[in-house]
Image (cartoon, rainbow, N blue to C red):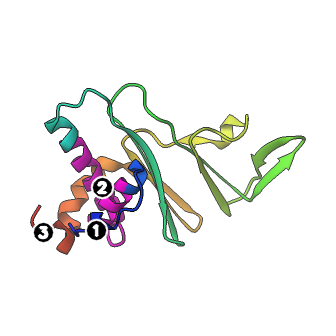
Amino acid sequence: MRDIYRHRHSTTDSEAFFLLAIGNGLLEVAPAALARSVAQVRGVMDAERAAEPFRMTAAFADGTILRALCVSTDAKPTTLFFAEGGDVAVEGGEVGIRPGRVSILVMSEPLDAHDGAWRDVPPGHILESRGDVVRVSALATARRAAGSERNDHGKGQ
């Protein structure tokens, strides 16, 4: 893992997790890096016998691929939803997404009352969107892949 924590500028947990993921190879092997980062946070929590659950949603994009994950260690998970469509529209005072396969919206809650347009990303899963292809897979699958995708970021761990 690269030593980049010294580049931290704020006190937010999102920046700390982002730097951890970058150090674990987010730019090279994103799903494996995210799985490794979640496992490291959980490992520290377990070692410290933290009573609080670990709940997190996060999204990362590089201009080509959008990735979003949902993590929860208890029965009250955070939520993460996505909808695919042509474009976002406001009609009759309601915001919605029109049919099509050009855009993707990723939100903590559905944006509108059209439940059929929204699908959830369950806890322990990662959404990956590239172009008009959207895939949701188990984060554990990415963790298993970490062993086969290791590069210099996996040395010494």
Q: Which residue lies at the image location 17% right of the left edge and 66% below the top edge?
A: 154
Question: Which is closer to the viewer, label 3 or label 2?
Answer: 3
Q: Comparing marks 1 and 2, which lies closer to the viewer?
A: 1
Residue that numbered label 3 is attached to = 155
Where disc 3 sits, the SS reads: loop
Residue 99 is at least partly visible in this image: yes
Between disc 1 and disc 2, whose residue precedes? 1
Q: Amino acid at mark 2?
A: Ala
The mark lying in front, picked from 1 and 3, is 1
Q: Amino acid at mark 3?
A: Lys
Inter-mark Cα distance, 1 to 2: 23 Å
Q: CA distance from mark 3 to mark 2?
A: 18 Å
Residue visible at 62% across and 42% down in the picture: 118
Percent x, y for residue 106?
58, 50
Depth check: give the residue in front, 102 or 60.
Answer: 60
Decide if residue 139 is on the left or right side of residue 10: left
- In reply to whether residue 37 is colored magenta, the answer given is yes
Identify residue for label 2: 142
| Residue behind mark 1 | 4
Closer to the chain start, of discs 1 and 3, is 1
Magenta residues span 16-43
Task: Tell me where residue 156 sits by quadrant.
Answer: bottom left
